[in-house]
């Protein structure tokens, strides 16, 4: 922005110098035009002085000739002066258009900067909200030997263990079932008692990604990468299976492909290695 301002100032100085030179040239031309009147007078005077007495006209004819010459030069003077003034007006109009164009470019740059600032303020506020949701999450662990509550990101590891257990149960019921139906069925059973814990989390994550996608900022992937950097390995694992299920298949999964949200995922942590083929390769590779 500073560089553009300096360029505009330099342009304005150059244009002012050109305008000054043009004005000086116009003044010089005006002086030359005024010299035409005494020149005509001296030509008229020399002509009548060199005439022989027999050829001399009457005083009235002489004055008529002088005034006719001066009138003719007056017309020429007016035309040339008007032409000079019109050229000056065109030059001033050109300078005005250049100045207006520069002001328009500055306003557009300021508008873009303000939109960028508004977007970033909202984005980082959403990011803080997302992290506060994660920090406030409570995952109850109820086994035959203990009952406790795990808070924060540590709980995602236990949530993923629950999903793996449900997948194993579904596979045991139908060993010949295909991979995707098994994943969907396992997540449905997992969501039956864990959706109250993870539902708010995934809705917030989805809406932040949607906010970035629908914004008019450039380098959207940069902000996606900032968001993705907040996710732990267990969160990425759950996101993988959430977007295969009916909870994320319709809306969230396309963003996973579009922005490569699973790029940092440790593929060896999948429940089955063949599950990777349930996504396009773009899900694991971002454009930046």
Image: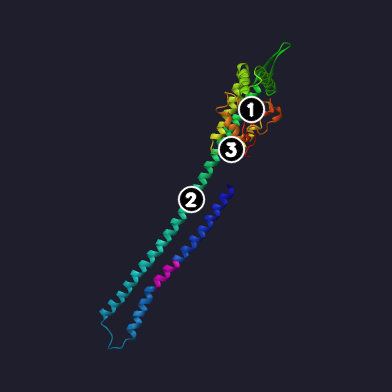
- The residue at which mark 2 appears reads as 101
Question: Can residue 278 be spotted in the picture?
Answer: yes
| Disc 2 to disc 1: CB gap under 8 Å | no
Q: Quadrant of residue 241?
A: top right
Q: In the structure shown, which secondary structural element does the residue marked by tag 2 occupy?
A: helix
Q: Residues within 10 Å of mark 1 (few under 14, many from 20)?
A: many
- Marking on residue 14: none
Q: Quadrant of residue 252?
A: top right
Camera-side residue: 248 or 22?
A: 248
* Cα–Cα span, label 3 and label 2: 29 Å
Q: In this rendering, which labeled residue sits more in front, label 3 or label 1?
A: 1
Give the color scheme: rainbow, by chain, secondary structure or one colour. Answer: rainbow
User: Measured from the top left, where is residue 172 in percent x and y?
Assistant: 67, 18
- The residue at which mark 3 appears reads as 220
**Vertical position of residue 147 compared to residue 285: above or below:** above
- Marking on residue 240: 1
Residue located at (48% from left, 50% from top): 101
Span highlighted in magenta in the image: 27-35
Mark 3 or mark 1: name the one nearer the start of the chain. Answer: 3
Residue located at (44% from left, 65% from top): 26
């Amino acid at each position: 922005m500073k560089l553009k301002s300096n360029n505009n100032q330099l342009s304005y100085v150059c244009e002012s110098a050109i305008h000054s030179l043009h004005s000086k040239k116009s003044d010089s031309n005006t002086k030359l035009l005024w010299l035409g009147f005494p020149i005509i007078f001296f030509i008229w005077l020399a002509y009548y002085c060199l005439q022989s007495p027999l050829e001399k006209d009457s005083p009235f004819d002489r004055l008529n000739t002088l005034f006719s010459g001066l009138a003719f030069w007056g017309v020429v003077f007016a035309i040339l002066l008007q032409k000079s003034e019109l050229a000056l007006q065109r030059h001033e109009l050109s300078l005005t258009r250049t100045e207006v164009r520069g002001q328009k470019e500055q306003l557009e740059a300021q508008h873009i900067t303000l939109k960028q600032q508004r977007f970033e303020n909202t984005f980082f506020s959403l990011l803080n909200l997302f992290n506060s949701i994660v920090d406030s999450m409570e995952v109850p662990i109820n086994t035959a030997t203990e009952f406790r509550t795990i808070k924060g990101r540590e709980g995602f590891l236990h949530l993923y263990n629950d999903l793996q257990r449900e997948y194993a149960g579904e596979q045991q019921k139908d060993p010949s079932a295909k991979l995707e139906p098994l994943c969907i069925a396992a997540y449905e059973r997992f969501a039956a008692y864990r959706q109250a814990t993870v539902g708010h989390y995934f809705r917030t994550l989805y809406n932040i990604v949607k906010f970035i996608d629908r914004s008019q900022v450039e380098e959207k992937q940069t902000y996606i990468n900032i968001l993705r950097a907040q996710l732990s390995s267990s969160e990425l694992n759950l996101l993988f299976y959430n977007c295969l299920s009916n909870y994320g298949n319709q809306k969230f999964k396309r963003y996973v492909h579009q922005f490569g949200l699973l790029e940092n995922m440790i593929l060896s942590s999948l429940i089955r290695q063949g599950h990777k083929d349930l996504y396009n390769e773009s899900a694991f590779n971002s454009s930046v």
